[in-house]
Image (cartoon, rainbow, N blue to C red):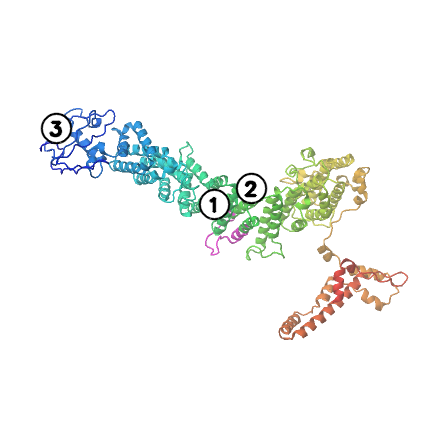
Amino acid sequence: MQRGMTMPSLFSGVSPPSLPSLPRGFTMPSLPSMPSLPSMPSLPRGLTVPSLPSLPRGLTVPSLPRGITMPSLPRGMSLPRSVAMSTVSQAPRRLLQDCCSVLDHQAPGGLCGCCWALRPRYKRLVDNIFPEDPEEGLVKANMEKLTFFALSAPEKLDRIAAYLSERLTRELNRHRYGYVCIAMEAMEQLLLACHCQSINLLVESFLSTLRLLLEHDKPHLHMLATNSFVKFANIEEDTPSYHRSYDFFVSRFSEMCHSEHEDPDIRNKIRVSGIRGLQGVVRKTVDDELQANIWELRHMEQIVPALLVNLQQHTHNHSESPAEQTEVCFRELLGRAAYGHINNAIRPVLMHLDSHTLWEGRSFAVQCFQIIMYSIQSQHSHLVIQQLLGHLDANSRSPASVRAGIVEVLSEAAVIEATGSVGPTVLEVFNTLLRQLRQSVDYELTGYYDNAGQNKTTSAEEKTLQDAVIKTIGSFANTLPVYQRSEVMLFIMGKIPVPGIYPALGSPNAGFEGSRMIQVMLLKSLLQVSERYESSNLLTALPSSFLEPLLSFTLMEDPEIRLLVLSILTSLIDRRHNATRLSNASVTFDVSLLELKEDRCSRQDVLFIRKHAQRLYRHVYLTCKEESSGRGHYQALIILLAVVSVELSTEEVVVDLIRVVLALQELALSNQECLSVFNRCGVHALCAVFLHLLSELGPPPPLYQHVTEVIESRQKDAPHLLSEDVFCENPRLPEGELQVAEEFLFVQSKIREALTGSSYSAHDEHFNTPYTPELTDEDRLSKRKSIGDVVSLQMDMNPQNSSETQQPQTEQITFETLKNTIEDRGSVEEEERRRRLQVVEKFQTAPFEEIAAHCGARTSLLQSKLNQVFDLIIRPPPSPSGHSPPRSTPLYEMKFPDLSACLSAV
């Protein structure tokens, strides 16, 4: 050992260390010998200098260069306690540990690596937070010192975080997981303690540390990193960061949500950690426009399926189950979605349900969209509906079970939607659903749900789909305001195929049966809309544009269609919901169960019944004449007439209804109608039940007495004329032809006497006129010979006219005569075809002047013939004196003066 050496060498063969740099402000004087080094700082309280043990065999102390001496420790300074040796026997092992500790904490080079006291302060403060035994946890007192130092010198935060990350990486590589947990706890406390302006100095090192932990294969490290990230996500930052990226965390947390660990408990913990991590990513990025856009489709395609996989696990036993955590995260994600983000959030849901064939189960799909509809903002609900409708169209070639599942989800989503609107394209929603109905009818008829004829379907599956679509139409209609429901009903009515008018609706191969099925489906949809339709007056509920085509369906041969039309009419007129109470009406029905109208009819209702009453009564009468009418039809007619009498309870309406019932009784007694015994008994039972209800609603007591007498007589001797024996599963009908005695009938004269002296007597003259169905224009054209019959009668009254003058006047002007006169048709089809070809050729080759002259000549000829027809129609009857009266102004000139002037000018 050289002279001046006081410190033994630690290792033999080790090169001497380099000279340390002098502290700031010190310079090397030009003296032959080195001055003494400055005094070293004092050690922390409680540190003492241990006695140096003997070195192991083979180790020698290296000598320092000449002239350099090791400075002595100041007074009161001692080495750390961890270096002290308890016994001499453990000296070699403890010395090796101390040397390793020094090498762990030192910088790559320099004398400070050997002298712990010369290390930077932030490193010493970081090293002090690690205890000797990792089970003791973080040294809180030293952690407080480190926190104070970080707050006092925020410019050192990046160095502190980098050194903590370095220590954590070193401990992780050596599998010292206890120290890893301590390092993460220290970084978390520094994050929470630092101000928002300086947190960016820590975040990069913190996130890189989390990436390192998440890439490890230990599950507990994944959970540790997730918990730290969640704490970081809850910190609100004032200053944005332009360079952070969370793509790794999105993919890694999504991967954790799909964990398939062997241990179920560990698997659930990993999945819960992944869900919480995704929730943290959403919280951290969703409200910051400068962060990575988490709503991009590439991110949503990772996040949403990861959540849905865990949502399928119905393990709601405790709050840490994946399903429970997933629902919370999913609701928070959707609740933060803006208008432009809804589509990207919903599309992965649809793709997941498709790829895992979850539409057929329906329950999970319904649960998903219930969460979606309750979580998103209400003004965005229609976007979800549009996505589902588009997906339904895209799956039009899918099996019926898949389509039915999508439709059922649509129905549930419409019920949840509370905004009162399905978006800007209301009619498009119903158009899509009606199109699905028509396609389902085509598939049911062909037996295949594709054009290639390879994928079979059954009627039962298509019926299930059709019922679901009809239910969905009703659900959507219930969310609309009243005025939009009227538009929807008119829209559906316009879609119903009418033979001869809309024969080509649906598939061209469907034929008559396809049209009938579509009619039934659309009428059922119309019934769903009308059942909850509430209007203040009937003029808006049943406008002429809707009522006339609806009543036309009561004349169709299909009994199901007629029954649906009666139900639709009843639901629209019944504003007090008495129809359900009248479903089992009989001659013993208690009228007190009904909700009666206390006030008088409104002006709009009076105008409605005056405008449409006769048309309504006519269709009721004609429905009873149909041989295919069954028990349901007669019960529906009873309910309809009862609802009309309750909703429109005026004296005029009551008198008209009694006239209609008496006309129906005469219809059942007539031998000219080809009605079965059941139909005749059903009509008699209908008359009895309705008159019983009507007699208890307000007319004078004598009417009730007469009705009661007839009913009691029937109960004794003719029970087959009452509803109890007719409208049952096994009707008890008489054998042979039906014979009805006078005592079992309601007599018009007695009813008239019962109404005498009351407010109904004002309509006595009207009551004496028997009811006959009002004929429409088509009926007049088909049943009356011609208008010329009246002219013929008028001509016969004038015997002075010669036969020459009477001959043209008594000619019958039939419909065919008018048709041939106006159209000037020939008798042979070949002649017509030849003339058409000539006309076409003439118009193609002839000059314009010739074409104009030809058209003018034909117009004059048509006008002259029209004048002849009008003269025959409006000619007044001859006068008894033989002088012809002066010509009066024609009716068509009074009604349409402008048109007459135009015709005269032509």
Q: Circle 1 is placed at which residue position?
A: 342
Number of numbered discs = 3
Q: Circle 2 is placed at which residue position?
A: 419
Start-end of magenta stretch: 437-461
Quadrant assignment, res 851 = bottom right
Quadrant assignment, res 766 = top right
Q: Can residue 842 be seen in this view?
A: yes
- Check disc 2 and report its element: helix, strand or loop: loop
Residue 340 position within the rendered picture, expressed as x and y whole percent measured from the top left: 48, 46
Judged by depth in the image, the label closer to the viewer, 3 or 2, is: 3
Residue 88 position within the rendered picture, expressed as x and y whole percent measured from the top left: 14, 25
**Disc 1 residue type (three-letter):** Ile
- Left/right placement of residue 120 relative to residue 743 reads left
**Disc 2 residue type (three-letter):** Thr
Q: Circle 3 is placed at which residue position?
A: 54
Task: Evaluate if marks 3 and 2 touch, with contact meaning CB atoms under 8 Å apart.
Answer: no
Quadrant where the N terminus is found in the figure: top left
**Disc 3 residue type (three-letter):** Ser
Task: Evaluate if marks 2 and 1 touch, with contact meaning CB atoms under 8 Å apart.
Answer: no
- Left/right placement of residue 189 relative to residue 33 reads right
Q: In this view, does 126 lie above or below 493?
A: above
- Residue at screen point 90% across, 61% down: 881
Mark 1 and mark 3 lie on one chain; the one further toward the N terminus is: 3
Residues at marks 3 and 2, CA–CA distance in whole angstroms = 87 Å
Residue 645 position within the rendered picture, expressed as x and y whole percent measured from the top left: 71, 40
Residues at marks 2 and 1, CA–CA distance in whole angstroms = 17 Å
Residue 180 position within the rendered picture, expressed as x and y whole percent measured from the top left: 29, 34
The answer to which of 606 and 778 lies nearer the viewer is 606
